[in-house]
Amino acid sequence: MSQVLKTELARVAERLGHPGVDFVLERPRDAGHGDVATNLGMVLAKLERTKPRQMAERVVAELRLPDGLVSRVEIAGPGFINFWLADDQLADIVGQILARGSSYGQSEIGVGLRVNVEFVSANPTGPLHVGHGRGAAYGDALASLLEWTGHAVTREFYINDAGVQIDKLAWSLWARVQDALGRDGDIPEGGYHGLYLAEAAEQVIREKGADFADLPAEEGVRQCRALALRMQREEQDRDMADFGVRFNVFTSEQSLYDRGMVEETLVLLAEKGLTYERDGALWLRTTQFGDDKDRVLRKSDASLTYLVPDIAYHVDKRNRGFDRAIDVWGADHHGYVPRMRSVLAALGYPPDFFDVALLQLVKVVRGGEEVKMSKRSGEFVTLRDLIDEVGIDAARYFFLMRPGDSQLVFDVELAKRQTDENPVFYVQMAHARLSGIFRTAGKPPDAVTGGLAVGALPADQDQELLKQLVIFRDVVQKAAQEREPHRITNYLQQLATSVHGWYHHTRAVGAPEGPATEHARLLLGRAARTILANALAILGVSAPDRM
RNA sequence: GCGCCCAUAGCUCAGCUGGAUAGAGCGUUAGCCUCCGGAGCUAAAGGCCAGAGGUUCGAAUCCUCUUGGGCGCACCA
């Protein structure tokens, strides 16, 4: 609907001598200001240094709108142009909602674009914590938003299974195995002290027998490495599966070495003349592309820095044909962004290929006191703990209520105590109530069919709900473009408010206004229920029929 | 020292490529169940949008500085 308007407004702007000018067409907060409003008059007035209201009048005079689109146009305030959509338009959109059902809201704006969303990518050295939970909820929702807007999306998880931290993990597990048999195991400097490794050690002994601990240390550690990796990966996969997140691709860092891609990357960078030797190390000229300092690729002891496999990984993504690679990282890695960006620029990739969504850290508070998170000390709140305490729906919804660049305070005690008052229940309740209407009506929602008679919806609450439904598609597009899933939770909150108000103040089944209104309200309720379910589906939150 | 993010109601936070009277949830106060689910609804109180300058028709939004938080600045990952 607004697409036609926007196109026409752009044409008018061009005709008035300002092609491509940036203006806004959006739903005003105040219903008295119409269904959609634009600031185009004011924007043009600024460019021409004339009076905004006068310019708005010129814009309106130039408008050539098709019949049946808007019922009223008004110039108001400092120079806004307000539009009221014709009833036919609203009825048409509800018709589309009913016809397309669970796929309504999808659009084609991203068709032809292949997008890789890499998220969580936790080191396989311990259980997932709440920070990973935020990354999982965000990455999964972002991937869904991109799918809903027509992109071809791959959900990917990168496994850092090479490098020194895995060696330390192996030694730590070996030490725990010794401990478990009453011997004196020493967890190495910088090793992992979490109790989960003690549990893992017991499992190893159950599987391998107590003789396992008698192996020569070198062999024992070698086996512990594989065992620890396997067990940690399995646990992470269980956590993600139980959180409702499915990945399409897992890429192992070790596999990049095994396939020779890491070495190839070094050659590639050298061929481009981007490397040089100094102090016995191999350096990368990232300063030529915006980094504040050149970076070491190969240390003077001949080992490679983590940067090399990371570059190889992004080259791999590019080679797999993706148009976009979006990495979801914790904000503590933000210093790493310009580095990677400059490397990829140096390789000649288009600037919009690589993007990073930084998520500020989650601060966990329990009973008013901060819980410190440290894998090494072993004290932290795991994602599993959180799911067990507050449930998947509440956890996901809470993680997605805030923009990623805001810090998130997650008070576990509060979340537990206030479960009944969580916003997610408010939203889910709206869905359950709508389902209840159809139970009362004695027929499933899909059985209520026909065209919507907007004129048979007399209450303010009818109209308010109708207008909330109409903007859903635009909200999804905006959320996808801005990569802001929290726009969906904000919208859900508003939609649920409209639903509850409507439910309370009007009656569908046995509407006092008569059968025409009953039918129109059932159609409206069915459409609202569909939109609630679709929005929740994007977030990975369930839409229950009863609570 | 340098860089990134942040500061909005008592609390947790939306709103930010400049727009109409700055919003929501929780908490507080006062109402509403012969009625499709009261896990709900209606209303009230509550704000120098951290502070100070600047840009202009217009600033919570953009710029500068100050203050106060968070996080980074390795031949660690």
Image: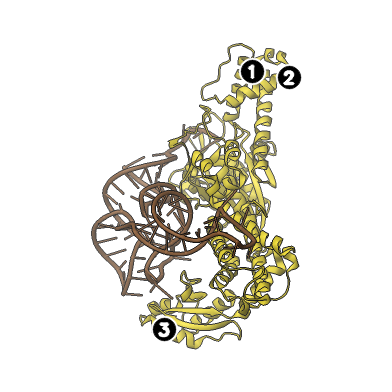
Residue A532 location, x and y as percent? Answer: 62, 60
Q: Which amino acid does label 2 sit on?
A: Lys
The 10 Å Cα crowd at callout 2, few under 14, some 14 to 19, many 20 or more, is: few
Q: What residue type is labelled 1?
A: Val
- The mark that comes first in sequence, 3 or 1, is 3
- The residue tagged 1 is A177
Q: Which chain comes out brown in the rendered image?
A: B
- The residue tagged 2 is A208
Q: Which amino acid does label 3 sit on?
A: Met
Residues at marks 1 and 2 touching, judged by CB atoms closer than 8 Å: no
Find the distance from the CA under tag 3 to the CA under tag 1: 79 Å
Question: What colour denotes chain A?
Answer: yellow
Specify whether residue A483 is in view. no
Residue A422 location, x and y as percent? Answer: 53, 49
Name the quadrant of the N terminus of chain A.
bottom right
Residue A133 location, x and y as percent? Answer: 57, 43
Tell me the SS state at disc 2: helix
Residue A509: give its label.
Answer: none
